[in-house]
Image (cartoon, rainbow, N blue to C red):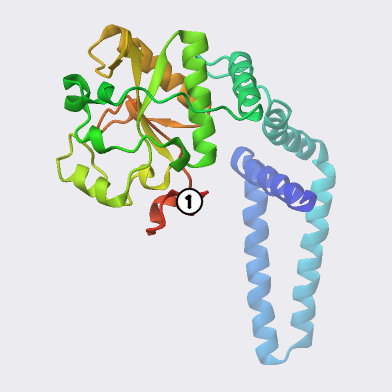
Amino acid sequence: MVFFVALYFALATAVLALWLLPSVRARFIAWGQRLFAGGAAAQRSITGGSQRSAQRVVDVVGTQSVQAVSWVARNRRLLIAGGTVLALAPLLALALRGFVDLDGYDHRQSREVNEQVALLLRGEQLVPPAPVPPDWFTTREVEQARPLIRTASRQWELLDSEFRQRLLVVFKIMRDQHGYDMVLLEGYRSPDRQAQLAALGPQVTQAGAFQSYHQFGLAADCAFVRDGRIVISEQDRWAASGYALYGEVARSVGMTWGGSWRSIKDYGHVELRRDGVLQQRSDTGPAAVH
């Protein structure tokens, strides 16, 4: 590795010298012309069987090599200075690799929040909240926002274990730090149900069977609870503020929030993405990805 780095700096210095120093460029061109002429003479001598011409070419090449070494010796300070200048940028980047500041980004605050979330994730396994009365899901507001919600699965045990723990951490932070109680509207979703929802149109979902993380227990649709009822519409100012906080907390535990999508906004949706999951084709349910 050190050899290749040194080779890079040597080549880069040579290129800069040829570009910035006319005298060096002229010498290099003259040397190349003489070397080419010597090569042509060598070819003629080989084909003609002339040993003396070939020896002359060798002498010319040797002389040019000596001259090149001599030039390097005379200009060693310039070469060292050029190499130092070229080395400054990567060395500076290496020295400052842990101290990168972005506009509007406080790395100290981010690290503090991440440590808190990490502590929660490493702590005791959180327990799902008690189920709410079934008739809470049959109000006009909920059914308009979530078609076929009555038949949705709200079984926490069907969710991927890692995703379930992260979602419970989100629920805990939303309740303890922001005063929002949350409820699971739908977790695991079978491929048949996904296809049924997709048939209702893109305003409901744009994902077909096996194209959603719901099929693998890695997604959930959630809403807020206030005064004994589910508040799901983002038109409610209180809920809109809650969804913004919900998105921030979900991202802080490594999940993707549906409110940040461009094609369709799904403010109650969160998912834990894993490479290759959506390429699976399995009828074994969420257990296949645990």
* Figure check: 120 above or below 213: above
Foreground of the two, 78 or 284: 284
Q: Is residue 250 left or right of residue 25?
A: left
Q: Position of residue 98 (x, y in %)?
A: 68, 26
Report the number of numbered marks.
Answer: 1
The answer to whether residue 9 is above or below residue 241 is below
- Between 109 and 75, the residue placed more toward the observer is 109
Which residue is depicted at the point 47% across and 21% down? 171
- Image coordinates of residue 264 in percent, x first then y, are 25, 31
Q: Residue at x 62, y 55 (%)?
A: 29
Q: Residue at x 65, y 90 (%)?
A: 47
Around disc 1, counting alpha carbons within 10 Å, would you say few (fewer than 14), some (14 to 19), or many (20 or more)? few
Quarter occupied by residue 185: top left
Compared with residue 268, is residue 216 higher up or lower down, i.e. above or below? below
SS for tag 1?
helix
Image point 21% across, 25% down: which residue? 138
Picture quarter containing residue 188? top left
Query: Is residue 117 rendered to the left or right of residue 202?
Result: right
Query: Whole-percent x and y of residue 34?
Result: 67, 64
Q: For mark 1, what is the residue?
A: 287
Q: Position of residue 142 (x, y in %)?
A: 22, 23
Three-letter code, disc 1? Ala
